[in-house]
Image (cartoon, rainbow, N blue to C red):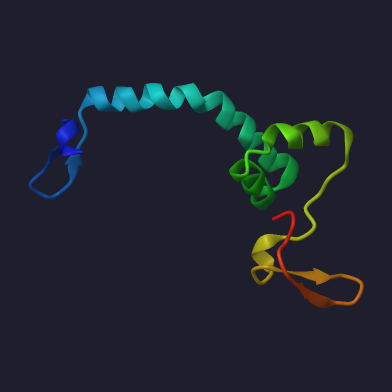
Amino acid sequence: MLARGCQQTPAGRIRIPQRLIEEMTAFQRKTQPADQRDQELHYLCGVDWAHHIVWNGKQDEMRRRLASEVLMSAAECRDRPRNSILDRESSRRLEGRAQLC
């Protein structure tokens, strides 16, 4: 950071010059429309499922499917042990990889 023009203050904080802030801002503006479209998946799929979709680059595929199918997350990730889901009919935990979260 110091090589790019930032300065360290006596208190140890980093001062970022205005030109670097403008450069970072310009770079992030390029991705804002895609970021906004990805955020819309949070409302359609829920946060955990939307993150899975985005991390795996499946946004367009999911939007196509949502246009013609009713889809929902099979499990709420934060309320269950990792890599297991609850079988609602038998009330047993099914170990293995969760497919949607």
Using residue 19 as the reference point, say whether residue 83 is left or right of it. right
Q: Is residue 79 or residue 65 the one in the foreground?
A: 65
Q: Residue furthest left?
A: 10
Q: Residue furthest right?
A: 89
Residue at 77% x, 53% y is 73
Determine whether 82 is above or below 41 in the image. below
Determine whether 88 is above or below 43 in the image. below
Q: Is residue 87 or residue 47 the one in the foreground?
A: 87
How many numbered marks, from 0 up? 0
Residue at 47% x, 22% y is 30
Using residue 67 as the reference point, say whether residue 57 is left or right of it. left
Using residue 65 as the reference point, say whether residue 22 is left or right of it. left
Q: Quadrant of residue 66?
A: top right
Q: Quadrant of residue 64?
A: top right
Q: Position of residue 6 (x, y in %)?
A: 17, 34
Residue at 71% x, 64% y is 97
If the image is split into quadrants, where does the N terminus sit? top left
Q: Quadrant of residue 19?
A: top left
Q: Position of residue 17 (x, y in %)?
A: 20, 28
Residue at 15% x, 35% y is 3
If the image is split into quadrants, where does the C terminus sit? bottom right
